[in-house]
Image: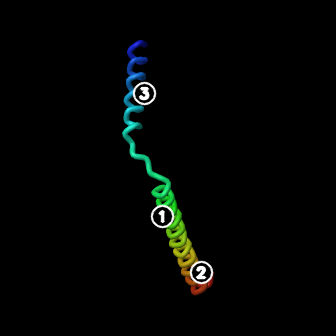
Amino acid sequence: MIQKITETKTFIEESWAELQRVTWPDYEQLKNATLVIIAFSVAVSLVIWIMDVSSRTVVNLILRVFGA
């Protein structure tokens, strides 16, 4: 039991030391990254929407041709 407590304490100390070495982004970097993610998400959504509309149109055309 004592060993587990010691290991946990060591883990927490090492984790805290590692967090002190992290380079956190400033506001400008965070804002730019957020805008890139939003733009990418919108672009992917548009591509998926276009593919959905296209495939639906093709399927409806095939069904009309074969009288279904």
Q: Residues within 10 Å of mark 2 (few under 14, many from 20)?
A: few
Tell me the tag on residue 60: 2
**Label 2 is placed on what type of residue?**
Asn
Q: Earlier in the sequence, mark 1 or mark 3?
A: 3
Residue that appears at 51% across and 67% down: 39
Q: CA distance from mark 1 to mark 3?
A: 34 Å
Residue 5 placed where, x, y %? 43, 17
* Cβ atoms under marks 3 and 2 closer than 8 Å: no
Q: Earlier in the sequence, mark 3 or mark 2?
A: 3
The extreme right residue here reads 68
Foreground of the two, 45 or 18? 18
Q: CA distance from mark 1 to mark 2?
A: 36 Å
**Label 3 is placed on what type of residue?**
Ile
**Label 1 is placed on what type of residue?**
Val
Residue 55 placed where, x, y %? 53, 76
Residue that appears at 51% across and 72% down: 47
Coloring applied to the structure: rainbow
* Cβ atoms under marks 1 and 3 closer than 8 Å: no
Please give left or right for residue 63 compared with residue 2 in the image.
Answer: right
Residue 61 placed where, x, y %? 57, 84
Foreground of the two, 68 or 2? 2
- In the structure shown, which secondary structural element does the residue marked by tag 3 occupy? helix
The residue labelled by disc 3 is 12
